[in-house]
Image: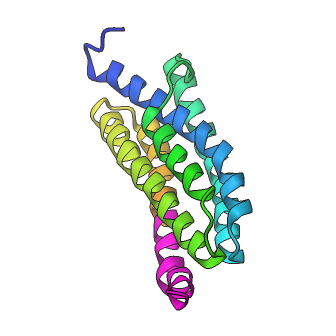
Amino acid sequence: MEIDSLRKLFVEELKDLHSAERQIIQALPRMAKKASNTQLRSAFELHLEETRGQLERLDQIFEKLGKKGLGKKCKGMEGLLEEAKEMMAEDMDPEVMDAALISAAQRVEHYEIAGYGTVRAYAQLLGDKDAARLLQQTLDEEGATDKKLTQLAETTINVEAAVGA
C-alpha cells in the first residue's frame, strides 16, 4: 500500500496501535500473575481493563473512518513484550522481579504515549475532532498509568528490591 497522504499514514499508525493494544491484552495477565506486590498486581489488572477500553475506542475510530483495524502487526510492541517475557523467565527474588516488571511496563507505556501523541496530532490536523478526543482520552490514561508505576517504583517496589542489594 502506498502511503501518499497524512490520512493514510494516520490509518496505518492507528492499525499499529490496534495491534499493540491486542498484544498488551495478552501480556498483562501474565505480568499481573508474576507480580508479588499486591499494588503492582492491581495496577496491571486495572490497566488491563483500561486497555480493553482503549481498544474499543480505536474500533470506534475505525468504524467512523470506514476502515478495519486488523491486518498489521506492531513489531515494536512485539519486541518490547518479548523482552518482558524473557525477563519474566529469569530467576529473580520476588522484589527484584517486581522492579523488573515495572521497567518492562514503563517501556510499553512510553511506546504507547509516543504513538498516541502522534496520532492525536494527526487527527487534530486532519480536523477529526472525535478521533482526537478519543485518542486524547487514551493518552491521558497511558500517562496516568506511567505516573502510577513511577510512584510505585520510587516509594515501594525499588526500595524493597534494594534491600537485598
- Indicate the position of residue 55 as horizontal and vertical percent values: 60, 39
Q: Is residue 154 left or right of residue 36?
A: left
Magenta stretch: residue 148 in it? yes
Which residue is situated farthest in the front direction here?
91
Q: Nearer the viewer, residue 39 or 134?
A: 39
- Indicate the position of residue 58 as horizontal and vertical percent values: 55, 35
**Residue 43 vertical placement versus 137 (above, below):** below
- Indicate the position of residue 126 as horizontal and vertical percent values: 30, 29
Residue drawn 33% across the image and 32% down it: 127
Which residue is situated farthest in the top direction here?
1
Magenta stretch: residue 164 in it? yes
Q: Is residue 112 left or right of residue 28?
A: left
Q: Nearer the viewer, residue 158 or 18?
A: 158
Q: Quadrant of residue 163?
A: bottom right
Main secondary structure type of the part rendered in magenta: helix
- Indicate the position of residue 106 as horizontal and vertical percent values: 46, 61
Look at the image and give the residue range highlighted in magenta: 145-165
Looking at the rendering, in which quadrant would you find the N terminus? top left
Q: Is residue 119 left or right of residue 74?
A: left
Residue drawn 70% across the image and 73% down it: 36
Q: Nearer the viewer, residue 148 or 81?
A: 81
